Amino acid sequence: MDFTFLPTNAQSILAMTWLDYEPYYNNLEARKLDASTVNAWLDDWSALASCVDEQFTRLQVVVSQHTADEELQAQFDKFLDEVQPAVKAADQKIKEKLLASGLQPKGFEVALKMMQAEAEIFCKENLPLSAEEQKLANEYDRIMGDTTVMWEWEEKTYWEMITLYSYETDRHVRERAWRAIWDRLYENCEAINELWGKFMAVRLKIAENAGFPDYRSYIWKQKRRFDYTPDDCKSFHAAIEEVVVPAAERVYERHGQRLGIEATRPWDLDVDQFGRPALRPAKTVEELNSKALNVFEKVDPKFREYYQAMLDNNLLDLDSRKNKASGAYSLCYNMARLPFIFMSHTNTAIDVDTILHEGGHAFHSFESAHLRYHQKAEVYVPAEFAEVASMGMELLAAPYLTQKHGGFYTEEENARARIAHLESFLVFLPYMALVDAFQHWIYENPIEASDGITCDDKWGELWDHFMKGIDYSGLEKYKNIFWHRKGHIQTDPFYYIVYGLAELGAVQVFDNARRDQKKAVENYRKALALGSTVSLPELFATAGAKFAFDAGTLKDTVDLMEEVIEELEAKL
Ligand SMILES: [Zn+2]
């Protein structure tokens, strides 16, 4: 059977049905597998898996581009109901065949370990449940996508409102905008809590079906976390509380003093400390792209080439419009071996941070495109390292964001943007610990936590533990539902910790670049190109970092960030 007959263009890929895929799976299952045939067999499997994956990715993309288009939604649902379960079942047989063969193809050791874990958690009864969970996630995106506010006779999206209250220099307007969006989010409570109960029921059933004592142990295996445990996460939370919470409090305090306010309220967190108007890095998407090209080039000319290829192939959706899902992502079309970036342009510093972040992910796809499907960045690379690619890029690019390099800012503006960025890295860690600790509580107390209102109270309690320095008095009802807007808690349980672990890696890469930029970027690219052919600690090591949770490593990174902030303060 000729696997080159698999479709390669978007239209034909989107039209694939299970009946189209089935003969290919049957062929792989029936073929003789030994040392002499394994490479060709893997190549064919890789092509087939890439095609299915690209169909899924393309559907995800179009649905997020048009949240109100019911026809597209129905098409996606059809894929989830009809194609995906059949494919997963067929794929499981192929995995078992490879595992049973005892063959250890070179460069496939890590993938085999991952497959072993997947085979262990596989359970046919869970296929419709996974599809159900995906639909709940789509429903969540729809609720958030529909969340608009009438603001001065204009309908504003949720993200437009966030930027409005974040950067507005008039404190009264900021507060009014903040309250408008949170009053609107409060109206979603019932819908979100009802959805939450459904999420929990599906997840608990999935863990039970797969034979796990609880959902967390299931997810640990599902996320293929071989290199750390839930207890490590808890030590990490404790280390953050010890080392980072005081540093974050220093940030809020400095901020409040400069703003000349008595208490830092939730609408005061992102506004410029000196009351300067918001940074406007790029008026249009075209401007954002042309400057991004220059900045990426300074990090490494190869990155400009990659970004240019994305522009040439129409692989960026960056503008802001209604009925577009919130958030940002980079996904890979694995047949085409090209990534796609999605975000909503706001002409604020967030755009720059986001394009660098998603750019890092996209370049990971380019660097690992030479590998087979199961070794590539999107498939088995641990997220803890995938986010080093993205957060590392945010920091590697930071020195080149000035107009001198063809970038977005004057020297002073860049110092300001970088301080804000590093401060956001500092204050992120306590928030990350909160989101992660909350989820440990949820899945350790699944019955109580199936009730959204109980979760609201627990979230509020944990918030006070980690989020010191922000005054929420009188706003408790909003504080307690803050987790409703945290998409990761809703749709990607236990993922959030990876940002914290990756941040530690990214800051170490940045530390290396401060000493030797060329060498640091070289190691970074080497690690990206490895895909998932080595373990998580080895990926970190190749990038020049240590995979760690301890207070010591954490303290070194916090000290470095505070040191750089001080250097930049001198440029203001
Ligand atoms: Zn990311």
Image: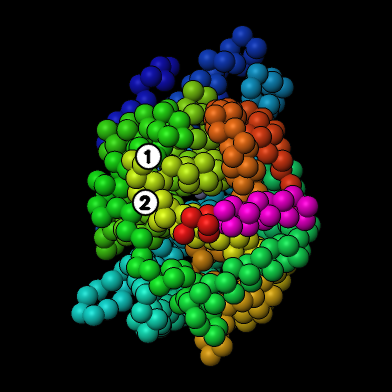
**What amino acid does circle 2 point to?**
Tyr
Q: Position of residue 272 (x, y in %)?
A: 43, 68
Magenta part mainly helix, strand or loop? helix
**Residue at coordinates 40% horizontally, 17% vertically from top-left?**
2
Start-end of magenta stretch? 550-567
**What amino acid does circle 1 point to?**
His
Q: Which residue is mark 2?
A: 409
Q: Is residue 122 visible?
A: no
| Distance in Å between CA atoms under marks 2 and 1 | 9 Å
Asked if 168 appears above or below 382 in the picture, the reply is below
Q: Position of residue 174 (x, y in %)?
A: 38, 79
Asked if 445 appears above or below 230 in the picture, the reply is below
Q: Position of residue 167 (x, y in %)?
A: 38, 69
Q: Residue furthest left?
A: 153
Q: Callout 1: 10 Å neighbours few (<14), some, many (20+)?
A: some
Q: Nearer the viewer, residue 279 or 455?
A: 279
Q: Position of residue 266 (x, y in %)?
A: 50, 77
**Residue at coordinates 73% horizontally, 66% vertically from top-left?**
241
| Left or right: 544 as drawn, with respect to 567 | right
Q: Which residue is mark 1?
A: 405
Which quadrant holds residue 508?
Answer: top right
**The magenta stretch spans residue 101:** no
| Left or right: 111 as drawn, with respect to 360 | right
Q: Callout 2: 10 Å neighbours few (<14), some, many (20+)?
A: many
Whether the residue carrying mark 1 lies under 8 Å from ligand 1 is answered with no
